[in-house]
Amino acid sequence: MNRIEERFQRLRQEGQKGFVVYIGAGDPDLDATHDLALAFDDIGVDVLELGVPFSDPLADGLVNQLAAQRGLDSGTTLGKLLQTVSRLRESSGIPIVLYVYFNLLHKWGLAEFVQAAAAAGVDGLLVLDLPPEESGDYESLMAASGLCPIYLVAPTTPPDRVELIVKRGKGFIYYVSREGVTGMQQTVSDTIGPMTRIIRQHTDIPIAVGFGISNPEQAAEVARNAEAVVVGSAIVNQIAAKGRATDLVSTVKTFTANLINGIR
């Protein structure tokens, strides 16, 4: 069983909700990414999403766009990121998902990349701009390497397409609770309850809800309708504020621990 599936199985058995963290890989550098990942593992983060720096991150709001640029500026590449994941695997079993745009995989070679990601210790891929209808042999390659293809459902996804998407996903379904791009919001979307009910009509794999969650109260509210909560921009914002400061990891660790306390 894949590490993502194992983690959600354990959470279900314990009656707990999951907490998923998104950060930009290589922001401010890959050593910081490594150390932050260890800190997240230490405080009980269930899945770590690493955003692969890309020049045109169309699904991302300003906070994550700037993180991607900082990752590019620090020299982060897909190959160097896989090396960092391999180093992480020497001391951490935290489930890792790469949040990535398809152009990067296409340039590498899809089959070769999936094998390389699995060998490095990656557990799943969330390819932002690869709809299942156009995925070709992506899912069979992922299955052969033991990786989970994570798919997105949005508030605007029609019910018949929800059924198609969720039956193709593994690990968890990522429900994007707001239209538009990533970013912090003042309130929780009112689409979460109705859309998670529609998703559950077609699958029993966990649902993780993200986009706009930025404080413990919002995390707790979202967790009532989902198996996991995803927080990205609010944590990325903390990283941006600290940069290369010596207390970067400790500050982000404390901030994230407070968010986790909101759901447990």
Image (spheres, helix red, strand yellow):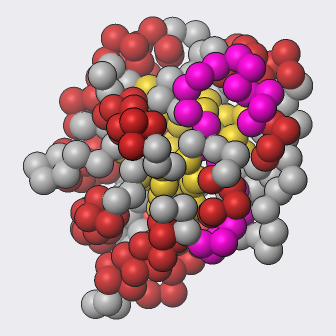
Identified at 39% across, 50% down, the residue is 46
Which range of residues does the magenta coloring cover? Answer: 196-218
Above or below: residue 262 compared with residue 120: below
Q: Is residue 89 or residue 78 the one in the foreground? A: 89
Please indicate whether residue 228 sits to the left or right of residue 43 in the image: right
Q: Quadrant of residue 144?
A: top left
**Residue 168 visible to an observer of this rendering:** yes
Of 104 and 221, which appears nearest the observer?
221
Asked whether 103 or 97 is in front, the reply is 97
Residue 261 location in percent, x, y? 48, 70
* Coordinates of residue 103 in the picture (x, y in percent): 56, 35
Residue 216 lies in the magenta-colored region:
yes
**Quadrant for the N terminus in the image:** top left
Please tell me whether residue 210 is drawn above or below residue 152 in the rendered image. Answer: below
Q: Residue furthest left?
A: 90
Q: Is residue 251 left or right of residue 230?
A: left
The residue located at (77%, 70%) in the rendering is: 185
Residue 181 percent location from the top left of the image = 75, 55
Give me the residue at 37% from left, 76% from top.
Answer: 253
Mark yes or no: residue 98 visible: no
